[in-house]
Amino acid sequence: MLRIGLFPGSFDPPTLGHFDIIEKSKILVDHLIIAVHSSETSLFSFEEKRLMLQKIAPKSKIVPLNGLVVDLAKEMEAEFLIRGLRTPADFDYEFQMASANRHLSGIETIFFMANDDHTQISASLIREIIKHKGSLNGLVPKQVEKIIQKKFS
Ligand code: ADP
């Protein structure tokens, strides 16, 4: 049976940290679905995020996340959720989310720990750097950097 994992997140924009979690998940899943949450305050639209994610995860299905993660997981027949952990602060938040999702549907969340050199990378840091026209080298995948540069050039 194919093992399907669902990786939900904002990906505003996708970073090297996200990319690393996507890569690590391959030891566990046959098929990874990436669910993208967007809001009015997102810097990038769903279509822009989809384009960026498709470049770094060409085999993954990229879908919008509008309702509850657990409902989407059921619809997509995902067996478990995938998330990343950087810091103890991440753990507090993720523990709460994983418990809530398990309570709602029985689904488990599987965590991969960030690489040492990714623990300080967050999408909000990337957005701040974009705002001040700084370098994204070593923070986002090259293909993502190109798309960001195109948008803001
Ligand atoms: P959300 O708004 O749902 O937290 P994010 O796009 O910020 O969405 O993050 C999605 C997932 O990726 C979360 O589990 C987060 O902990 C993980 N993540 C984000 N940045 C990194 C990183 N640098 N290294 C490892 N995991 C990360």
Image (cartoon, rainbow, N blue to C red):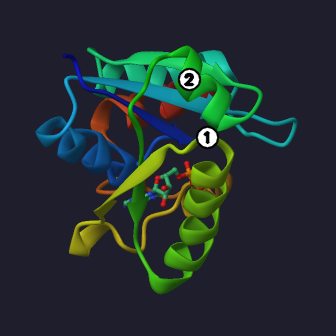
Please give the residue where the numbered disc 2 appears in the rendered image. Answer: 74
Local crowd size for mark 1, using a 10 Å CA cut-off: few (<14), some (14–19), many (≥20): few
Determine whether, in the image, residue 89 is placed left or right of residue 144. Answer: right
Residue 64 placement: quadrant: top right
Residue, far bottom: 88
Instruction: Kindly identify the amino acid type of the residue bearing the numbered disc 1.
Output: Ser
The answer to whether residue 91 is seen in the rendering is yes
From this view, report whether residue 110 is shown above or below residue 12.
Answer: below
- At 50% from the left and 16% from the top, the residue drawn is 76
Q: Secondary structure at mark 1?
A: helix
Instruction: Kindly identify the amino acid type of the residue bearing the numbered disc 2.
Output: Lys
From this view, report whether residue 21 is shown above or below residue 38.
Answer: below
Mark 2 touches mark 1? (CB < 8 Å): yes
The answer to whether residue 12 is seen in the rendering is no
Q: Is mark 2 within 8 Å of ligand 1?
A: no
Checking the image for residue 105, the label placed there is: 1
Q: Quadrant of the N terminus?
A: top left
From this view, report whether residue 24 is shown above or below residue 89.
Answer: above
Residue 10 placement: quadrant: top right
Asked whether 89 or 43 is in front, the reply is: 89
